Image: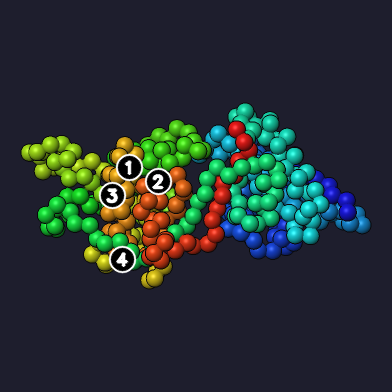
């Protein structure tokens, strides 16, 4: 076996797909999209390994390292090797080459991170390479009616409408809370500075896939004191951003809603300055509302303590279930 290494070229994706077949894991499916020609905007280096047999070069593996505008303190890296060429040193050689490229990144950042599924060859490879887990992420489907509906104020419709609101995704108030929440639960891998415009682009505009947002507010009196004007609203305590239209609380589905029986993908979070008990209560109440009649899909990181405290008992009782395998984010040690 004679292995040669070169830069990625157009057409390599089709050649590698032919020999790799379908992705073995969800992480592989996601990362294959990052295999592309090397370039500088954003900075990326992609290397292909070829097995040369009788003078014919056949791509059998590829690796990529690139910068990211979100979470800029590490570089993303990915390596995939054909099943028949694993444990032959090809992956290790690609990793060494990617580390050499990373040492020359324009940002000066050289630490690598990637995502793997526990118990897979990829997980064993990164462990042998000295990378360590920094976060566990799970996809969780919450079944309809898993939580009892909350009662707001005196239980009237007016009291509920005072605290539960459909909010435009372009709202600066919403963008501010979303950005601060995302930062607060990613201390393990800082997202960097998140301006209002950047939050809207990444999480809230049409290109992000966002369809709408529902927010939970504190009662007005708790935010401003007694006798506040009717136009004033309580502070925003929790938010749910849907990436397919959420079914309204009245149960009527709108255009673009998730197909019947399919869970709606939702980013659920809270005002990070709430106490632990307040955050858990706010998240629980909003989750109970959005998952009252239809299932909801949540991405749950272990760092999301309030959401974890609400969802873990649902998993244990069978009112929520995991979708797919866990994902570990692993990184070079500090």
* Place of residue 114 in the rendered image (x, y in percent of width and height, measured from the top left): 61, 45
Q: Is residue 86 above or below residue 77?
A: below
Distance from Cα at disc 2 to Cα at disc 1: 8 Å
Distance from Cα at disc 3 to Cα at disc 4: 17 Å
Q: Kindly identify which residue carries mark 4.
A: 145
Q: Kindly identify which residue carries mark 1.
A: 276
Q: Nearer the viewer, mark 2 or mark 4?
A: 2
Query: How crowded is the residue under tag 3: few (<14 C-alpha within 10 Å), some, or many (20+)?
Result: many
Q: Nearer the viewer, mark 4 or mark 1?
A: 1
Along the horizontal axis of the image, is 159 left or right of 64? Answer: left
Q: Which mark is residue 305?
A: 2
Along the horizontal axis of the image, is 19 left or right of 287? Answer: right
* Residue at the outermost right position: 54
* Place of residue 165 in the rendered image (x, y in percent of width and height, measured from the top left): 23, 51
Residue 77: image quadrant is top right
Q: Kindly identify which residue carries mark 3.
A: 281
Q: Earlier in the sequence, mark 2 or mark 1?
A: 1
Q: Residue at x 12, y 36 (%)?
A: 225
Distance from Cα at disc 2 to Cα at disc 4: 22 Å
Is the C-beta separation of discs 2 and 1 under 8 Å?
A: yes
* Residue at the outermost left position: 227
Q: Earlier in the sequence, mark 2 or mark 4?
A: 4
Distance from Cα at disc 1 to Cα at disc 3: 9 Å
């Amino acid at each position: 076996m004679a292995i040669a290494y070169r830069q990625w070229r157009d057409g390599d994706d089709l050649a590698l797909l032919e020999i790799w077949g379908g992705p073995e894991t969800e992480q592989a499916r996601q990362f294959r999209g990052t295999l592309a020609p090397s370039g500088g905007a954003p900075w990326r280096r992609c290397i292909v390994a070829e097995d040369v047999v009788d003078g014919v070069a056949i791509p059998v593996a590829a690796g990529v390292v690139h910068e990211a505008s979100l979470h800029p303190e590490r570089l993303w890296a990915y390596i995939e090797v054909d099943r028949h060429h694993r444990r032959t040193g090809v992956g290790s050689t690609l990793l060494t080459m990617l580390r050499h490229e990373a040492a020359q990144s324009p940002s000066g950042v050289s630490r690598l991170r990637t995502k793997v599924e526990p118990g897979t060859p990829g997980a064993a490879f990164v462990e042998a390479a000295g990378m360590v887990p920094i976060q566990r992420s799970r996809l969780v489907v919450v079944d309809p009616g898993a939580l009892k509906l909350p009662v707001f104020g005196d239980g009237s419709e007016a009291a509920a409408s005072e605290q539960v609101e459909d909010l435009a995704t372009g709202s600066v108030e919403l963008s501010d809370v979303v950005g601060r929440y995302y930062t607060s639960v990613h201390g393990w891998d800082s997202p960097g500075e998140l301006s209002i415009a950047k939050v809207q682009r990444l999480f809230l505009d049409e290109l992000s896939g966002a369809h709408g947002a529902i927010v939970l507010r504190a009662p007005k009196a708790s935010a401003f004191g007694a006798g506040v004007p009717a136009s004033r609203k309580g502070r925003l305590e929790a938010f749910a951003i849907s990436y397919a239209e959420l079914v309204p609380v009245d149960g009527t589905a709108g255009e673009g809603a998730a197909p019947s029986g399919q869970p709606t993908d939702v980013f659920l979070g809270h005002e990070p300055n709430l106490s632990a008990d307040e955050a858990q209560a706010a998240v629980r109440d909003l989750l109970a509302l959005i998952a009252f009649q239809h299932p909801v899909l949540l991405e749950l990181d272990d760092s999301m303590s309030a959401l974890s405290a609400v969802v873990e008992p649902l998993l244990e009782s069978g009112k929520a279930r995991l979708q797919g395998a866990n994902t570990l984010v692993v990184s070079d040690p500090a």
